[in-house]
Amino acid sequence: VLVEGMAAGCVIIGSDSGAIPEVIGEAGIIVPEGNEIALSEAMLKVLNNEGIREKLSDAGIKRAEKFSFEEFIKNVYAACIGDSQSSS
């Protein structure tokens, strides 16, 4: 869902749990899990600042491209070629 949102240009605000920060990277805002105040502050920051919205939206679109099927295949191929070359 995070990647789909980024691909659609939505600004992503996520918690610091699990792989969420890894997926969002610098393309969104990370808040502590369960911290409603931090979440509301992040939401207000995005709502009240058009520059931040545009910056994060653009960054999200670019970040989402790293999760495309094509990128996945490239990474799998590179991993397989790397593994076969290192065993020779």
Image (tube, rainbow, N blue to C red):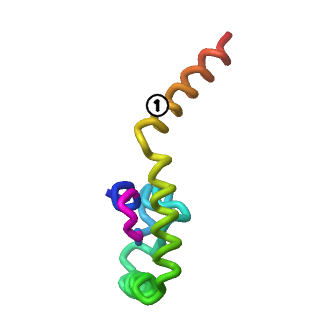
The residue sitting at 44% across, 89% down in the picture is 48
What residue is shown at x 68% (from left), y 10% (from top)? 88
Most common secondary structure along the magenta stretch:
loop
At 39% from the left and 64% from the top, the residue drawn is 9
Residue at the image position 53 percent from the left and 60 percent from the top: 25
Q: Is 12 placed left or right of 51 in the picture?
A: left
Outermost residue, left direction? 1
Q: Is residue 72 above or below residue 15?
A: above
Query: In the rendered image, which residue does mark 1 sit on?
Result: 73
Q: Is residue 87 left or right of residue 40?
A: right
Q: Nearer the viewer, residue 21 or 70?
A: 70
Task: Tell me the crowding category of disc 1: few under 14, some 14 to 19, or many 20 or more residues within 10 angstroms, Cα based.
Answer: few
| Quadrant placement of the N terminus | bottom left
Which residues lie in the magenta part?
7-11
Q: Amino acid at mark 1?
A: Ile
Q: Is residue 40 magenta?
A: no
Label 1 sits on a secondary structure element that is: helix
Q: How far across and down, in percent of the image, does residue 59 sit?
A: 52, 63
Q: Looking at the picture, does residue 25 appear above or below residue 65?
A: below
Where is 65 relative to 18, above or below? above
Residue 27 coordinates in the image, percent (x, y): 51, 64
Residue 3 on image: x %, y %: 38, 55
Instruction: Compare residues 33 and 29 and report the one nearer the observer.
Output: 29
Which of 29/51 is in front?
51
Res. 41 image quadrant: bottom left
Tell how many labels: 1
